[in-house]
Amino acid sequence: MGRFAMNLIMMAGLVAVQVLRAEPAWKPESPTYARPQMLVEPKQLDTGKAKANYHLLDIRDAKAFTEAHIPGAVLAPKGIWSAAVTEGNADEAFWRTQLSQLGITPNKPVVIIGDDIKEAARTWWLLRYAGVPDVRLLHGGWQAYQKLGATTESGPVTPTPEPAHSWQLHPQLRAEKAEILDLLSAQTRNVQILDARSLEEFRGVRKLSNRGGHIPQAIRLEWSEFLEPQTQRFLPAEKLRDLLQSRKIDLTQPCLTYCQSGGRAAVVAFALELMGVKQVKNYYRSWSEWGNDPDTPIVNDAKNP
C-alpha cells in the first residue's frame, strides 16, 4: 500500500475518533420551572447582602421570630392583611399604610419566610393582590434556612418606614362568588376550577361549613400534591408537569383555585404560576363562603362509596 493511501486511512481514522468524541449537535434542555425566579434558595439569603437585595418578610409568630430570624428580616402581620381582604377592607389606602410601615418599596423583590407553606403562599398572594410587583417564596421555608446552618439574629426588630407608595390593586387575581356562578351558567368556558382541599372535604364527608361537597365541574388537586412531603419544597418541574397532565390541566388556559379560606388555594395558584400559567385567580373566600350559602350549587357524593 502506497504512502498516500496509508495517509488517507490514518486521516479517516482520526476524523472518526473526533466524531465519536464530539459533543452532540443538540441537547434537550433540562426541565425547569417556567418562572424559577419565584423561588429563592436559602443560600441566596446567607450572603450578608440579603437585606440589600430583598425585602425580607417573616410571617412566623412573634415568639419564634424573636428567638431567631434571618438578618434584615421584619415581622409581617399576615393575619391583619388576610382579615382585611376577606372583609373587603383592603383598599389602596390600607396597603399604602401597611407596607410603608414595613419599609416595603416597589424597587426590591419581597421574599416571604415562613414555617408553613400554606401561610407563606397566602402572604405571597395577598401582596400580589396588593400590587407588589415581585414577591417570592423562600424555597423550603424557615426549616430549609435553619438546616443550612446559616446566619441568624435574635431579638425584636423595629422596621424602618419608607415613604408611602401608591400601590395599584390587582383585582384580576381574585375570584368572587358571582363570577363563578356566571361561569357555571355559561354555555362554554375555558376556565379550569381547581379544588385544593382534601378528598374528604371534596366529597362532602368532612364539612367545615354548613354544607359539604365541591363546586360543580371542579377538579380536585390537593395542595400537598405539589410538594415534597418532608421539606415543603415544590416538586421538580417535570414531576409538577406530570401531575398537572394526569389531571388534564391545560397550562395554556386560565385557572381558578379555591379551598376553605384561600391559603391552600394560594399554594396551588403559586405552583400554577411557577409552571407558566398566565391567568390564575384565587377564590379567596372559598368554601367558607360557598359552603355557607344555601343557594350555591354544590356536588356532594358523601353517600356514595
Image (cartoon, rainbow, N blue to C red):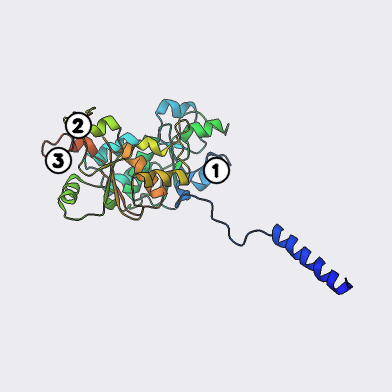
Under circle 1, the secondary element is helix
The answer to the question of whether label 2 and label 3 lie on touching residues, with beta carbons closer than 8 A, is no
First in sequence, mark 3 or 1: give its number.
1
Is there a contact, CB below 8 Å, between mark 2 and mark 1?
A: no
Q: Is residue 169 visible?
A: no
The residue lying furthest to the left in this view is 295
Q: CA distance from mark 2 to mark 3?
A: 11 Å
Which residue is denoted by mark 2 in the rendering? 212
Relative vertical location of residue 249 with respect to residue 197 in this rendering, above or below: below
The image quadrant where one finds the C terminus is top left
What residue is at 22 percent from the left and 43 percent from the top? 88
- What's the amino acid at mark 1? Gln
Residue located at (70% from left, 58% from top) = 20
Mark 2 vs mark 1: give the one in front: 2
Residue 185, position as x, y percentages in the image? 14, 50
Marks 3 and 1, Cα distance to the nearest angstrom? 47 Å
Element type where label 2 sits in the image: loop
Three-letter code for the amino acid on which mark 3 is drawn: Pro
Q: Nearer the viewer, residue 77 or 155?
A: 77
Q: Residues within 10 Å of mark 2 (few under 14, many from 20)?
A: many
Amino acid type shown at disc 2? Gly
The numbered mark, 2 or 1, whose residue comes first in the sequence reads 1
Seen in the picture, residue 62 relative to 122 is either above or below; the reply is: above
- Side of 195 relative to 117 (left or right): left
Task: State the residue position of label 1.
Answer: 44
Q: Which mark is residue 112?
A: none
Residue identifier under label 3 = 297
Q: Residue 214's image quarter? A: top left
In the foreground, 128 or 223: 223
